[in-house]
Amino acid sequence: MDYHLPGETPRDRMWARLAAARTARRRRRRLGASVLAAAAVLALAFVLGRQDPVAPPAPRSSEFSRLAAARLFERADVLLSTPSAGDAGPRAGALLAQTRILLDCDVADDPATRILLQDLELVLARLATADDAEIHADIKDRLRLAAAGA
């Protein structure tokens, strides 16, 4: 009856083999996680390096704005004081664009200048769209005063 008896089970060798396989699997996981983390860091660095840096907004120069406003007031005074030669519409349109730009600048923070620019905008818009627009004397006087004072 001893014919089909199994031999001694090598339990120690089996457990050593299982422990070695488990250790190898853990090493592969750690290595895979490390490689994945390094790839993520490289991809993030690449993406961040490709983006344009956020540029700080350009400072609005109050001195430049004041000079531009004074020049605009002088040109508007000349336009409104001289008889129309047929080109008042296009010239008024160009001055209107400059007036609207100055309304967005820091020179318009002064309430008196803002009101003057808004009045000038209305007059220039009317002049740019009309053939013979009636220009009020008070706006011309205000422009002359502003050009002299600015």
Image (cartoon, rainbow, N blue to C red):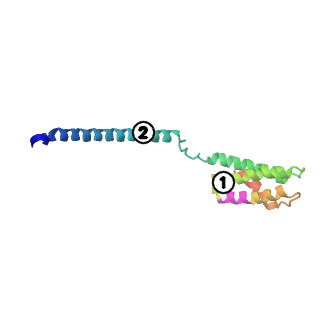
Give the numbered dot on residue 104: 1
Q: Amino acid at mark 2?
A: Ala
Of helix, strand and loop, which mostly describes the magenta segment? helix
Question: Which quadrant: the N terminus?
Answer: top left
With 16 as the anchor, is 130 left or right in this view? right
With 122 as the anchor, is 37 left or right in this view? left
Q: Relative to residue 100, is residue 45 depicted above or below?
A: above
Query: Which residue is pictured at 22% across the width and 41% down the height?
Result: 18
Residue 78 on the magenta segment: no
Query: Start and end of the magenta stretch?
Result: 111-118
- Please state the horizontal and vertical placement of residue 42, each as a whole percent of the image: 44, 38
Can see residue 24?
yes
- Please state the horizontal and vertical placement of residue 31, each as a whole percent of the image: 33, 38
- Please state the horizontal and vertical placement of residue 24, each as a whole percent of the image: 27, 38
Give the numbered dot on residue 39: 2
Query: Which residue is pictured at 74% across the width and 49% down the height?
Result: 72
Distance from Cα at disc 1 to Cα at disc 2: 47 Å
Q: Amino acid at mark 1?
A: Asp
Give neighbour class at mark 2: few <14, some 14-19, many 20+ (Cα, 10 Å): few
Query: Which residue is pictured at 73% across the width and 53% down the height?
Result: 99
Q: Quadrant of residue 123?
A: bottom right
Give neighbour class at mark 1: few <14, some 14-19, many 20+ (Cα, 10 Å): few
Q: Nearest the camera: 104 or 37?
A: 37
Foreground tag (1 vs 2): 2
Can see residue 140?
no
